[in-house]
Structures are given as C-alpha cells and as structure tokens.
Amino acid sequence: MSIGTLALELLLMPLVAFVVGLAMVLMLRRIGARIQRRVGPPLLQPLYDVVKLYGKQTQISHGIVHDIGIVMAVGGYIAAETLLPVPGMDGIAAKGGLITLVYVLMVPMLGLALGVGQCANPNGSIGISRALTAMLAYDIPFVIVVFGISWHYGTTDLTRIIALQQAAGPAGWGAAEMPLLAIAGLIALHASLGKQPFEIYVAPAEIATGPMVEMGGKYLGGLFVMQCFQLYTASVLYTTLFLGGGENWILFLLKIFAVVAIPMTLAYLFPRYRTEDLVRLLWKWPVLIGLVGLALVMR
Amino acid sequence: MTALDNLLLLALLTVLLLLAGRRLSSLGWYLTILFGAQFAGLLMMGALGYGAPPVPSSLHIGVMGQVMQWRFDALSWLFALITVGAGLTSSWYLAGDWGRHYRQRGGNLWLLQLALAVNVFSMLLLLASGDLLSLFIGWELVSWSAFLLMALNGADAMRAALRYITYAMAGAMAMMAGLGLVLHTAGSLQYADLAAAVPTLSSPQLWGLILLFGMGFGVKMGLLPLHLWQARAYSETPGPGASFLGAVSTRMGLWGLILVLVQLVGLVPIADLAIPYTFLDARELLMWVAALTIILPTYTALRQNDARMLLAWHGIGQGGYMLLGVLMGDAMGSAGGLMHAFNYATYQAPLFMAVYAVRYRTGTSDLNRLGGLVTRMPLSFLVMLVGIIGLAGLPPMNGFVSKWLIYRGLINDGQPLLFIAAVVGTFGTILSVYKLIHNTFLGQLRLEHVEVREAPWSMTVPMLLLSAVVFVTGYLPGLVLDWVAAAQQAVGLPVLVHTLGGVESPLGSLDMIWVSSLMFAGFGIGALLFYAGGNRSKAVHQLDNYAGGHFLSADVRYQYSDHFYAGLMRHIGPLYRNSFQWLEGALGTTVETLGAAMRAFYRQHHPAIYLLAVTTAGLIWVIL
Amino acid sequence: MKELDVRIETPEQRPRSNPLARVFDELVRFCRSRSMFMLHYCTGCGAIELPPAMTSRFDMERLGIQPMVTPRQADILLITGYVSIKTLKRVILTYEQMSAPKYVIGICSCTVNGGMYWQSYATAKRLDQYLPVDLYIAGCMPRPEAVITGMRELMAKIRDGRADSWQDYYRRYDWYLGNQQHLFGDDWQTPTDVIGEAEHYRLTGPETLGEHTALLQQHQKPLEPLKLQL
C-alpha cells in the first residue's frame, strides 16, 4: 500500500466514524422518543448540537488539564478509529490488534477522567469513580469475550478475524459459532455505552451528569463528539468480532446500526441500577454466560 | 582484571568512600557521580545485552571444597542495569534539597546514603554470583542491607523492618535447607552440577527444591502469602530509599526465581510435577500464586489512603505479572515478564519520587489531605501522569508493551482464567492510580497549599529523566526487547523475535511506533479541533463551580476523596477479610506459645535432668 | 433606581476578514436556534407546565430543546415562577455561570411583576431588573402551548440575531449590579468574575464599570484563576 493511500485511509476512518456516529446518536434519540411516544429530534439535531456548542461565545476552563483532557478524549478516539478495520480500509489495524485496541480505548477515558478531575467538582469526581467502577464491571465479561475470540481464531489481528469469518460465510460468523460469547459481549457492550440502565456515572438527578457537570461550550461539544466515536467504535468492534465485519458498506452500516439499536431499544425500558447492583449484575450473568461460552469454545 | 572486576571494585569503592567521607559537604553529589561511574562500567559490558558470552570475574575463592566464583550474564546485566539506574536516580534525588531537608528534620543523611551504596554493591555481588554458595552469601548481604535502609526512619520504620527481617530470615533458612538439599543430591553447589542432576531427582526432591527456593526468593518478591511485610516496610523508608527499594529490591527475588527455576531446574521438569487430585501441575500452581499476587495486593492498594502505601502495594502486585510471564516459558510471555521488571522499575521509581516531592512541599502523602496541586507542581504532575499510565499498562508507555506480551503469551498458552486474572489486576490498577493522581493533583486546591511551589530541580530532573525513559522505551520497545532477548537466551528460554516497534507475528502483531505515533497524531487533531474551533476559553477560579446554586467558599472543602470507590466497595468490601494478617498473627501466636511452653519446661522443671538426658543421648549417638 | 432601558444595543462590529464569515455566523445562529439546552430553575408553580411540554404530548425535543442539568451546559435559563430574594441570589449565580450566548425566559406573571406576591416583602418583583430577560411568557400559569409558542419566538429571535440581551448584562453590568446590591446589601458578591469575563471577550461597554462595581471591588474576594506555576 502506498503512503498516500494509507494517509487517506487514516484521515477518512475517523471522519467516517464521526459522521456515522452522529447518525447513531440521532438513532438512539429517535428510539428513545418513539418508545416514549414522542416525535423525536430532527435529522440534523446532533450536528446542530455540536456546532452550537463549539459556537458558544464564552468558554469556561478550569485550567490546562481540563483542556488537555478534552483533547485526549477526542484525540484518543480519533487514533483508535484507525485501528478498526472497515470495508475497504484497514488503516493500521494489522499493527495493533484487538488487545491494543481495547487498551487504546482506555486512553480517552483517562483523558476525560483527568479533565474532569481538574474541574474540582465532587459531582464530576464521583462520576469518574462510578465510571471506572462500571468499566471494571463490564470489562471482565468483555475480556472473556476477547480471550474466546483470540483463541477461536488463533489471532488478535482484527483484519484476519474478519477475513476468516467472511471466508466461512454467515454460518461461520462469531455469533453463530460462539453464541454464548456473543450474548455476553452484547451485554458488556450495552454497559460500556453508559446508557440506561447502566448510566450510573451520568445519573443527572443524583450527581448532576457526573463527568459533564462543569463542561460547557466546546468542552461539552468535545464530549458529544466523543460519544459519537464511542457508539461507532463499540458497534464496529462488535460487528468485527461476531458479525463478520463488513462485506460492503451497505451491509456494514446495517450491521452496526442494528448492533446499537438492540441495546438502545432495551435501554429506555429500564430505570438506573445502583453502582453495586450494576457490578453484581455484570459480574454474575454475562461473566457466567461468557465462561460457559469460553468452555465450549475451548473444549 | 575483567570488566566485572572493575564494576564490583567500583561499587566497593563507593561504599568505602562513604564510610570514610562522612564529613564531606556534598557527599550526595559524589555518590551520584560514583553511581554514574558504575553505570558507565555496566555499559562497558553492554555487549552482554546483545548476546555476548558471560563476563567472568577473575576472583575465585575455595571454601570447604567448594569454589566460589562470580560472573555476569545477560540476565544479571539486565537486572544490574535496573539496580544501578535506580541507585543513580535515587541518589541524584537526595543529593540536593531533599537531603538537606532530611538532615534538618533530624534524619541521618549519611547513613541513608551509605545504605544506598551498600545495597547497590550487595545487589551487584548477588547478581554476579556464579554458584549457589556465592548466591547465598550475596542473598544474605542483600537482605541485611535492605534492612539497614528500611530501619532508618524512626520507630514505625523499625517495626516494619523487623517484620521484614523476620520474614527474610525465614526465607534464608528455607534457602539454606534448599542448599543442603542441592549439596546432598547434586554433590556440589555449582550451577552446572545442579542443572545436570535435575533429571535424576525424584519428584519429592524436586518439590522440596521448588518450595524451598520458592520460599527463599518469594519472601523478597512478596509472593503470596509471604507479602505482608513489604508495603509497610517500603513506605516507611525515607524518600529516595523507598523509590530505590520499590523499583528494584523486590526484583532480586524474581531474579533468583528465574535463575533457579528456569535456568537451573528448567520449566519442563516443573511442569511434569503433577499435583494429585487436581488438574494442576507445579508450574501452574506457581502461576496461580503469581496471579493471586497480582490481584490481592492490587485490590489492597485500592483501599490505601496513603500514597506511599498505595504504591508499595502495587509494587507487590506488579511482581506477580513478572513471575507469571516468566513461568509461561514461551517466547512472548517470558519476554513480557522480563521486560516488565525493567519497565516497572522505570515507572515505580519516579512515582515514589513524585509522591515524595509532594510530601517534601506539603508535608503529607495522605490522599485525603491533598488535592488540586497540579497548578502548583505541574512537573511532578507530569511525572506522575507518565508513571501511572505506565503502571496501569496503557499505551503509549512501556508498561503496556510488557503487559501486552504477557496477555498474548497467556492467550497462546490457552490460559483463560489466568488471562482474566491478569486483566482484572490491570483494571484494579487503573482504578487505584486514578485515585492516586486525582486525590493528589486534581480536584480542589486546599487553602493551606495555595503557596506551595514546584519541587527543586535536583528532585525534578531525575524524575523527568526516568519519565522520559518510560516514554521512549514505550515508543521503541525494541531497545529493551534486545536486552530481554539476550537474557532469554542466557537462561535457556525461547528467544522472542522482535522489531524495534514491538512484535510481528501471525498471532497478532504490535507496532508501538505506529500506535504511539497515531495516538499523538490523534491528540494533535484533537488539539486542533479544540484550540482552533470555538472561542478561546477563559480560566475561572475553582470556587466558580456548580454546587446546585450554593455559594462556595475556600474554607469549606468541596472535594471527593475519601472512600473513593464507595459503590464498588459496597459490593466487594466484604471480601476483604485480612486472612493473611490473621494467618500471620496465628503463626506468630503459635510460635510464641511454643516458645513459652519450652521456656517453662526448660526453666522450671529440673533442668539438670534434661541436660543429663540430652548429654547421655548425645554420647550414645557418638559412641554408637 | 434607574428605569429599565429597553433599547438593545447593536453588537460591536469588528472587521471580519473572512469572506465566509457571514455565512458562518448565519450557520451558527441557525444551529443555536435549533439546539437549545434549557436549565429550568423551578422556583414556582409554573414548573408543573414543563413536563407536559417536554414529554409525549407536546415533545419539545422535536424543536431541539432539551433539559440540561448544570448551568455550564445550558443555553436557556427558565425561571418558572416567583423569585424570592433568597432564590434570586442563586438564580443570579446560576445565570452568571452559564456560558454565553445565554437567554433568560421568565415564565408566569410573578416574574413579570410579582404577580400574586406583589405585596410580599421577600419577593423580587421584576426579574429584568436583576437579569437581562429575553422573553416573558405571561400567564398564571401559561399552558404548554404558550410555553412552546414562547420558545418558538425565542428561536426566531436567535435566528435573526435579535436575542442578544446577554450582552446587555456585560455592557451595563454596573446597573444590574446596582439593583442586586440594593436588594442584597453592599457586600453582595457572586463567584463569577463578570468584569474579567467581559474584558476577556471584549464585551465591555461604557456602563460596565461604575459606582456599584467600584463598591464591589472594595470588598471583593479575589477570584483570579489558579495559574500554572513552574
């Protein structure tokens, strides 16, 4: 591959991720609205929100770490997108692989945590403490999934995982071969998105949206952008591991939107868990299902 | 005179100069320069790190038919590099203002410096040992010199140090018994003879060997259940001493385990020792011990409220990763384990230094009495940030590379539960280090810390230097992997095929040059979006803050620090049962009771008769 | 006390070199009008009319209006009822913490003239003496339709660039502060450094500083941000 193509891919991948992520945000707000029998926001609402927030006249900063936190949160995701293969573009997926991606995805979280820390608002700190607790909870089933996938396909290289699945056709997709792991992964994915009933770290009525408490203007705008990336990344990763990646863009988009739609449809039906209940739930059911699935994979 | 002779002589000279130069005014700087010279001496043997044959010492001593000799191979060289590097930066750290401050507060600076020099010398001697006898002597020297360093800082430190030395003596006894076993079975204490005798050993003998040496070295390493002494002892050691001990002292145990279990006994015979009625063999048992050593201390660290204790507990936990990696015995896992020893030293030392820099300026390392210091001590914040990213094992720092290799090794090995255990340890670390940096540097600045300034340059420069190492070896892990590969070769492990950026393999590659570069490119774009998009921001006072409409004032704390993971603790809190504390207490009480009983027996009931009986029995045994 | 000056000053015309500046401004104004995050300070009974406006019956979200939690995130401050003096302090603090452009909507008669609390000694009668109010939605209480109509009016104002009363707060801060001091006493101080902000964003006008700000600066606890010190 020439350097020019690679550079183009590295630029396009985050851009595509952002645009698709905006559409996903719209979808999830629409799903929420429909379930509550509302009309929901117009088509470009997520874009309006982001432009408006960046277009604020006064921007309030709590110091340089606050700024850097937002930079890291957005920049970390931009980097992570280049590790996620999409149809026709592999970026540097072969140089990182699954484990690297999982850990690169923690860097934006860390950036956000640092930025929130400097805001000197206890609501934000509580939010981060809860977010990290939630991470500890949902990442355990998730690493079981990661192990099962790596063991099953014999590699952590995402491009190879996709190639193996596509060669075998839908019957050879991860979800067909490892259904229990796919279920565990879906629950972990749902929790990782931080939506109801797992939105303990936002909890507007309790801790005033936690990490977002002191974020306004382009700071909040950065977090909106980050949310777009987050939805996109989680769904593409799940599609890559269990649904054979994308044969072409149409199928790919169908799959990733479906992956977000399933947990979001469930999300608006439930109230929020308490922190310890969330930990208990995620350490019990998905872990149990995942371990059984893992045993079946490794037998 | 070989290069090794020069190095050991230089280390000895350092100790002697310190003994003689008590009155010298800037002794700290001389010590730093001498450590620098030792470092240079080590670099003279740099070829060892690239696969050169071992460097022997010209010194040989014959004792009771045993020849004691010393040599350096690639493994020793790697660990010596860590040792002298930690010694150099620690002595640099204490050479300037920290040392003056320590003396003004009544500390014996000279003794601290001397202890540092003695520690480095004894560790080098240990690493150079060429047979089991010199190993044992080096081991004892290391144990006692560490005691010297730990016991400096008042009554609490003395208590912790005494606890340490009790454990260390138990370990030494175990090792001595192991030595007896080796002498009995192999007929000599030479490494080669032991290695040759291993295939002939019966399995109880092999078990004995593993357990005895495992206990001997495991005490130093803080392997479960022998870890209780460590956190308290390290955190009570004065600043640079703590960073030195934390970075490297524990790793001597790892070195010993690698030497005995991997190099001499070999992992194959260990893996052949099945444990009856279980699915485990001896190697897997040790791996599970390592995994528990990761998890339990890490989650104990999560509950600490003193930054030093938190770091010291993590030190124990990180040791588990190294042992786990090495015991895997494949190229990736063992490279990860060895590399982690190096990486860990490079971030643990600056982390301790940053904590002590904060302590130097504010007088406390209590995580509930700090906060918001980032505006006052930005360099220390940067050092701690780099350090915690390394400790948590996140890219782009070096801790990620070694942990990646360990994870990859566990997947190759097909060890799902151990893999989960390792990752659970990492998550615990992320939680706990965020608490560390948040409670120290982020959040609300306390009223009494408004006037605090950055630590002086003599302290920040070594910290920054080590942080740079953390970053550079994370960006170009191939630099360290060269040395690791040489060490793997030296101990007979499969050698990792690597590139400058990491590993290339069909099982999954890692190229840190690409990953890190793209991360920074991503940050660059993020910065562009942030700074170019939107109006420029205005910084506000920390009291201009959302509090549900409440008017904040400086005298009321608005900070979340205590019981940081309350929700999690409500779930896992009941699991903290202090079982090991209880076990230690029970053991202590048993020994005390037995001792009292014996004393009573001996003192109060006709001692003469017992004496007579023992003498008669002895006589009969001699005559027959 | 001076009478309320209803004249809205035109924003300072800075030279714009970018040929697309007008288009860009237009776009931002449009997005502002279509994305309004509101902070409802539910001071009185008007709050009860907001849930129906937000939920399935009237669904504000289709207009891009969402509730938000903290002042930092919000664009609109909804005051839904009478403001007692004690509440007014919090309302002002909250308003100052919002980032501009920010809009205040007074709902119910109480915010217009005190309503049924007109005779109360503890209630501020006219909200626009203390904060620049963009829009009143009168009624006791106004129904959700009225609230939504008001919101639409505000949207039109924002799109046309007429909703700039937030600038008035910076430009005539002295006057607003004077009214606040008259009510709360001379030692009144909020945590937000309004004058510093006005200077930072070049929003100062001839009446930003005056006798009242001088009084404030006499007793003000310093609110400089904590600078990074090397």
Image: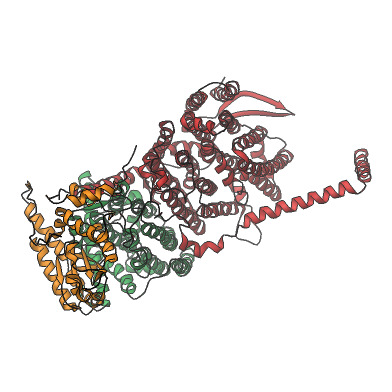
Q: Nearer the viewer, residue B223 or A295?
A: B223
Q: In this rendering, does residue A163 appear at all?
A: no
Q: Which residue is drawn at 30% across and 67% down?
A: A260
Residue A132 x, y percent position in the rendering:
41, 58
Q: Residue at x 50, y 30 (%)?
A: B100
Identify whether C38 is placed above or below B263: below
Determine whether, in the image, residue A51 is placed left or right of residue A271: left
Q: Which image quarter: residue B127?
A: top right
Count the numbered circles shown: 0
Q: In this rendering, does residue A177 appear at all?
A: yes
Determine whether, in the image, residue B310 is placed left or right of residue B513: right
Determine whether, in the image, residue A22 is placed left or right of residue A150: left
Residue B426 x, y percent position in the rendering:
46, 53
Residue B287 x, y percent position in the rendering:
56, 52
Chain C, colour shown: orange
Residue B553 x, y percent position in the rendering:
36, 53
Determine whether, in the image, residue B362 is placed left or right of residue A48: right
Q: What scheme was used to colour the molecule?
A: by chain
Q: Which chain can be seen in green?
A: A
Q: Nearer the viewer, residue C179 or A111?
A: C179
Q: Which image quarter: residue B166?
A: top right
Q: Which of B142 and B438 is in front in this view?
A: B438
Q: Which chain can be seen in red?
A: B
